[in-house]
Amino acid sequence: MAKMGSRGNSGKRPMPRWKRALLIVGSLVGGFALVIGALFTWLYTGAEVSTVGAVDFRNALAVPPLAASTVEADGTRVFDLRMQAGETEFTPGTKTPTWGFNGSYLGPTLRAAKGEKVRVKVANTLPEESTVHWHGMHLPAAMDGGPHQMVPAGGSWAPEWKVDQPASTLWYHPHPHGATETHVQRGLAGLFLLDDAESAALPLPRTYGIDDIPVIVQDVTFDGAKLDHGHELMRNVGFLGDRTMVNGTLDPYATVRDELVRLRLLNASTARVYTFGFDDGRTFRQIASDGGLLEAPYATDRLRLSPGERAEIVVRMQPGERTVLRSHPLDAGLDFWNQRFGGGDDSFDVMQLRAAPTLRPSAELPGALVASTLPTGQDSVRSRFFELKMSGINGRKMDMSRVDETVTRGTAETWTLRNDDGMPHNFHVHDVQFRILDVNGAAPPPSLRGPKDTVFVPSGSTVRIAMRFDGPADPDTPYMYHCHLLYHEDKGMMGQFAVVDPGGPAAAPNPPPASGSHRH
């Protein structure tokens, strides 16, 4: 006989619907969180790149040829550059579509001396318009090769100027507004070396390609035979490749036949910051920065270069030894996110140096190099502030028709650069070489005390720079200042300044010529 009050076999009340709904929602949220956590862990783990110990250095380093030139009756040195599309076999038998100057990839090294007048005849045979900017060169704004000096497809351009700056390692590359990153990645870049009597009198390694070697460093990723230009997820700094090459050579080695070898380092990557050193921790000496020689050689075992920066270092070799130029993880105070997803944890074996069994003796480096002529900030007539953000400099995106700053010819200024953007930036100023006065209120390290045109500004940093504007005034044609992480530049992190005579105003910039027209 059944007992009174029985509710069936279980004797339990049914769970209310709202509780069941909460359990289902909780399970879904928990499962979603697990998926997101697993995805983030996968992305975080896969974001670190390292080629350390994995490079076989099987290819002899290519050295860009010195560009041929002619000298006209008035002494003008004339170069010819042809921007062209082609194919390059980075790996034998695999043809990669590329762009270059006077060849399929990169360009020849232009060389001129202080006091010379130069003219560069540029022909654009590419399928689209582009420019050639002379990075680090002091020259009239109309000859600068910024986005106002576009060379249309099938067009030509012949800028000319007098070289009026010290011996230095400069470079040239495209500067089309909104497309600079892809044009540089495709291969449009080359060195422009300047000489002067003061540098020539010093006992420095100087035989090009022998004991004075250009080292153009780029990071790349291949998608089959093609160069990959894509940005991976959460890489807000821009393109970061999974391997490096030097002078267009994968897995390169350079044979050294002298006790001292001078390496002219150029970070020609579009977003990656390198911290150069050697695998055996050896000390080397830096002798120059972007715009020329330091006051004295600086001994170190690490040297950081952000995109666009250059440095010259001298390395001592012993007969028969080998050492690897390595890029170590970045130590710049980046936060957890940017350290991993901005490439800060990455490391690369960049190039091997192989010393011959016997080496030619080299003269010792001098204790002093050149006296600095950079402005000290004491005679600055004006200070300006630049807030660096991906959304724009000082809150404004680049506008080709707007002059952001007007400076007076013959005066010096102090500019303060501040980055609170949560990601790395750097800052490049056209036409001038500046002195870094301080970094976060402290004196700059010796590596940053020479002439500079580009400086790394990590998030949370303040950098003050002093410069003098002593070139010709041109109220109608502006120069650029911008972040040289090229994705940032292309997205509008750039501004314009015009140099005017005392009391003169700046005019609205002339628009670039319509595509299809010719410039001579």
Image (cartoon, helix red, strand yellow):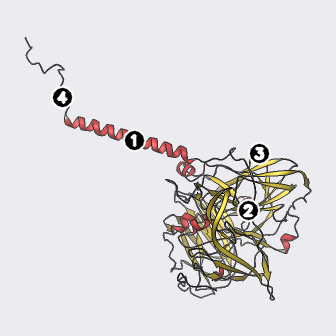
Q: Residue at x 52, y 45 (%)?
A: 44
Q: Amino acid at mark 1?
A: Ala
> Mark 4 or mark 3: which comes first in sequence?
4
Choose top left, top right, bottom left or bottom right for residue 141.
bottom right
Q: CA distance from mark 4 to mark 3?
A: 72 Å
Residue denoted by label 4: 14
User: Relative to 320, is 511 above or below?
Assistant: below
| Tags 2 and 3 touching, CB below 8 Å | no
Residue 444 screen position, x and y as percent: 69, 60
Note whether residue 443 is visible: no
Nearer to me, 331 or 321: 321
Q: Residue at x 66, y 62 (%)?
A: 88
Q: CA distance from mark 1 to mark 3?
A: 44 Å
Q: Quadrant of the N terminus?
A: top left
Image check: 504 left or right of 249?
A: left
Q: CA distance from mark 2 to mark 3?
A: 20 Å
Residue 508 screen position, x and y as percent: 52, 84
Residue denoted by label 1: 33
Residue 200 screen position, x and y as percent: 86, 70
Residue denoted by label 2: 311
Residue denoted by label 3: 280
Q: Amino acid at mark 2?
A: Ala
